[in-house]
Image: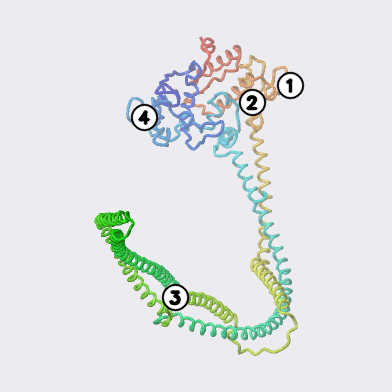
Amino acid sequence: MIIKRMKASFGKLNNEELRLDGGLNIINQPNEAGKSTWCAFIRIMLYGLNTSERDKAGFLSDKTKYRPWGAYPMEGLMDIVWKGKEITLIRKSKGANLMGICEAFYTGTGEPYPELSVKSPGDNLIGVPEQVFRRSAFISRPNMALDKDAELEKRISALVASGDEDISFTEAYEKLGKWLRKRNRKPSGILLMAERERRDLSEALDRLELENDRIARLRAEKDRLSAVRDEMKAELRLHRRKESDAIRSRLIEQRKEEEALAAELIALKDSLSTAGRLVTKEDLALLQRTVDAFKESETLTERAGTEADEAYDDLRQTKWNYAQSGGKKSKFAAYLAFLGVFMIAFNMISTVTYLWVIGAGLILAAILVMVFELKRTGKTAAERNAELKTLESEYNEAQERFRSLDSVNRELKRKVKAYLSRLDPHAEPDNAYFVIRNAEAGLIRLEQLKLRYTAAKKNADELEKIHPDDETENISGDVRFTKEEAESQLLIIERNLEEISQKLAMAMGEIRHLGDPLVLSSEVARLDNVIERITLECEALELASQLLFDANAQLHNRFSPLVGKRAGMFMRVLTDDRYTGVVFDKEMNFKAQEKAELIHREIGYLSDGTTDQLYLAARLAVSMLVLPDDDELCPIILDDALANFDDKRAKRALELLQELAEKRQILFFTCRERETYTIT
């Protein structure tokens, strides 16, 4: 098979194209140009993308690592020449099925090529499964080392033994080991489980016997404690009878007290009720407010009456005063005038000559008094009338205020009498406060009687509840223990009986759990047969594993020299005849032998470059042996495989590859100009 052209939307390859020729193709590109991506693209075009891989710490799956960087979907095509026909392979993605659709056509036409339009066309094109291809013709750093693989073992077996590629020592050996572990692996092997089950059943039979003995002892103890419990219950019944008699006596006394309080309560309610209605605190408060208003009104009325009387007295006194003051002045003037006339007359008969002067003076004084009085009387009449009107107005106002207050007082007195008649028909407003105090005391007494009655009834009801209804049982006898002692002992016995009952239940449950002794015995016999049979199977499997191991050693001894001889030839060329021998064990641990030495050196003693040369020689040898040797040799892919080679050994390797490329296509991807110059 020859790859002619590739075009890929894959990883960093954004619809890029790569054209190739037959023979040795050296693709020289710088770092990050996509060399390893092209190698992975070739592998996935041939065998498909494993979408079941998951990313892990330090590892990216192919579906993540090679997801296109651009906007294009993951897809690609490959033009190849196979069996003389030009064929185009196309892979597409659909949803999560990345690169899962593979189609093959004759190049330049739309005619399908069914033989390669399969999920893994590499099986037909290369002739081996992917795992064999990756361990032979697909050589990529840093994974140049060879490791064990079941598919590679099948291919080797086909070469050196039966020709049947379905046979793998690893798979067969692991399957035998799996069967053997299934039987005797700890702790879940069939043999061990059967032995464990047999041991458990034997222990169960022993425990059944012990549990039966334990149950018999528990039942005897339970019977004894039950008898003692019955004695304690009878003792407590005697105590309860005595307590019942005491409760009955207290109940009778309490009911009597309840009846007496009820009668007193009814009588007090009757005394505080009017027309069947009980006086309330609100009624007394209203009466109190009315009486207070009446007393205050009565005081105000008396004060208004006094003020009216005083106003009347002032008016009358003023009138009398005004009447008396005018008469006195007129009499005085008359007395003066009479005295003056008398003096003048006496002067006529008297020898005193100046008496007429005194008489004239007195008459003149009388005239002046009268003139002055007349002037004064005429000036204050209006004032007297005004004063009298003012006094009459004040008297009228006082009289009106008195009548108004007296009316209010009479109305309040009527209300007080009406309210008092509800409490005491014979009560008067004067002793209203006394009636109110008595009513308040009665209400307080009523509340106290209610509380006492409620407490007495509650006590009687509680005694009624605890008093047993059934008193027909006639129990007699003497008590041997106090009630507290009997209750304490009964409690202990009940607790012990409960513990014994629980132990009995657990023992019975254990017996039920353990099962029927006959069934257990038959199961033990069956397990003995199973253990014997599985023991024989284990011995047979161990023998088969040993025989298979010996056969694989013989196959390895036949295949190892073939690979070692071919790898030694390549190693001689690569190291310029320094290392001439290569050997490896069944675990694919390779060793190299220098020409002048007798021993083979392990990988750990070789330099990195020599190690890569050893693995390159081994992979080329495996490719020569396990890949189909026909007209359609598959290409060999190398990705920077000579990175650790010095110039001299790199030249030897390129010369070897150029020689091999005469028969098959070799694609050599490198980032160094050295390989191109060397070939040129």
Q: Residue at x 35, y 32 (%)?
A: 112
Give the total number of marks visible in the rendering: 4
Q: Position of residue 641 (x, y in %)?
A: 56, 20
Q: Position of residue 643 (x, y in %)?
A: 57, 18
Q: Which amino acid type corresponds to the residue marked 1 in the rendered image?
A: Leu
Q: Secondary structure at mark 3?
A: helix
**How would you rate the neighbour count of disc 2 (Cα within 10 Å): few for under 14, some for 14-19, many for 20 or more?**
many
The answer to which of marks 2 and 3 sits earlier in the sequence is: 3
Disc 3 target residue:
432
Q: Secondary structure at mark 2?
A: helix
The answer to which of marks 1 and 3 sits earlier in the sequence is: 3
What number is the disc on residue 598? 1
- Decide if residue 33 is on the left or right side of residue 555: left
Q: Position of residue 463 (x, y in %)?
A: 59, 80
Q: Is residue 620 above or below residue 196?
A: above
Disc 4 target residue:
105
**Nearest the eye: 327 or 139:** 327
- Decide if residue 656 is on the left or right side of residue 561: left
Q: Which amino acid type corresponds to the residue marked 4 in the rendered image?
A: Phe
Q: Is residue 166 above or below residue 369?
A: above
Of badges 2 and 4, the one in the foreground is 4
Q: Secondary structure at mark 4?
A: strand
**Nearest the eye: 287 or 294:** 294
Q: Are marks 4 and 1 in contact (CB under 8 Å)?
A: no
**How would you rate the neighbour count of disc 3 (Cα within 10 Å): few for under 14, some for 14-19, many for 20 or more?**
many
Q: Is residue 504 above or below residue 676?
A: below
Disc 2 target residue:
564
The answer to which of marks 2 and 4 sits earlier in the sequence is: 4
What number is the disc on residue 496? none
